[in-house]
Image (cartoon, rainbow, N blue to C red):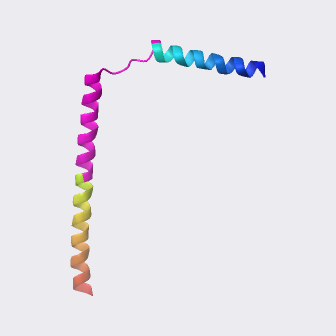
Amino acid sequence: MKKFFNNVASYCRESYNELVHKVSWPTMSELSNSAVVVLTASLVIALIVFLIDFGFEKIMTFIYEKVF
C-alpha cells in the first residue's frame, strides 16, 4: 500500500513539474486570435448547415406538393 501512495505522489510531482517547466502556455493575444478563429469557423459551418437544411426543406416541400 505504501508503494501505491509513493507512486501517486511521484506522479503528482512529475505532473506539476511538467506543467510548470515544460508546457508552453499561449499568450493572451494568441488565445484571443485562436478564439476568434474558432468562433468564425463555427458561425460559417452553422450558416452552411442552415442553408443546406433550408434548401432540402424547400425541395422536399416542392416534391410533396406535386406528389400528394
Q: Position of residue 60 (x, y in %)?
A: 26, 74
The image quadrant where one finds the N terminus is top right
Q: Position of residue 64 (x, y in %)?
A: 26, 81
The answer to whether 65 is drawn above or below residue 10 in the figure is: below
Determine which quarter of the picture holds residue 8: top right
Looking at the image, the residue that sits furthest to the right is: 1
Q: Position of residue 50 (x, y in %)?
A: 24, 58
State which region is magenta: 21-46
Q: Would you say residue 24 sits in the magenta stretch?
A: yes
The answer to whether 63 is drawn above or below residue 46 in the figure is: below
- Residue drawn where x is 46% and y is 14% of the image: 20
The answer to whether 10 is drawn above or below residue 36 in the figure is: above
Determine which quarter of the picture holds residue 26: top left
The image quadrant where one finds the C terminus is bottom left
Dominant SS in magenta: helix
- Residue drawn where x is 23% and y is 54% of the image: 48
- Residue drawn where x is 30% and y is 27% of the image: 31
Q: Nearer the viewer, residue 1 or 46?
A: 1
